[in-house]
Amino acid sequence: QFVVTVIHEPKLLIFDEPFSGFDPINAAIIRNEILELSKKGTTIIFSTHRMESVEEICDHIVLVNLGKKVLDGSVAEIKQQFKEYIFAIETSHPELIKDNALFSIIDKADKNPNKILVKLSHAVASNEVLKYLIEQQIPIVSYNEVLPSLNDIFIQLVEDTHAKARAFQNI
């Protein structure tokens, strides 16, 4: 069906759950073909609940919940809009990193004992934290901002409405 749909290189393609039912190898083949069509100028619209696919493929998204648009914009802009000022710090000496006025430790990250997640205090620039770590002579392997996934943003935006709908059904 996919080949028949794209063989004539249409200007517009609309897919509904394009990766449903595919194993990872065939899903990757379809994803690569969709990306290639997009590079050639085809406008592609697809409906999916698989936010990791959206994050991987889309430049612009519209999030619809219960028939209403709740979010619209570029993936990069949306992730920036929902960021929580969390940074991952990887160091060979994580025990040297302590809570302070610039940030608080919120978790160990990624099952890596040398990586720590910190949340910056209000109005602290990320460069101030990096400067502090260097001044404390903490050896830094990596220092990266952790942006929320589209899946996290989706859950944050629609969780309330689904809870209300379930409560209404129980009345």
Image (cartoon, grey):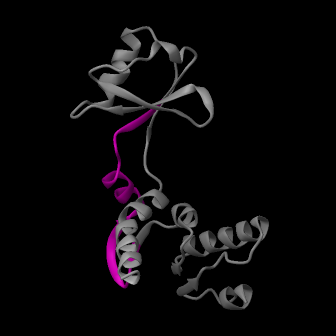
Q: In percent of the image, x 60 and y 69: which residue is there?
A: 35
Identify whether 8 is placed above or below 23: below
**Taking 38 as reference, is 145 left or right?**
left
Seen at 70% across and 88% down, the residue is 7
- Is 110 on the left or on the right of 139, as rendered? right
Q: Which stretch is magenta?
A: 62-88
* Residue 139 visible to the viewer: no
Q: Is residue 64 visible?
A: yes
Total labels drawn: 0
Which residue occupies the foreground of this view, 40 or 15? 15
**Residue 109 vs residue 166: left or right?**
right
Look at 34% across and 74% down and name the residue there: 164
The percent position of residue 103, horizontal first and vertical second, equals: 33, 27
Residue 38: give x, y in percent of width and height. Answer: 55, 73
Residue sitting at the far front: 171
Please say whether residue 72 is one of the residues in the magenta stretch.
Answer: yes
Q: Position of residue 129 (x, y in %)?
A: 34, 23
Residue at 52 percent across and 61 percent down: it is 55
In this rendered view, identify the residue nearer to me: 71 or 14. 71
Q: Which quarter of the picture shows residue 57?
A: bottom right
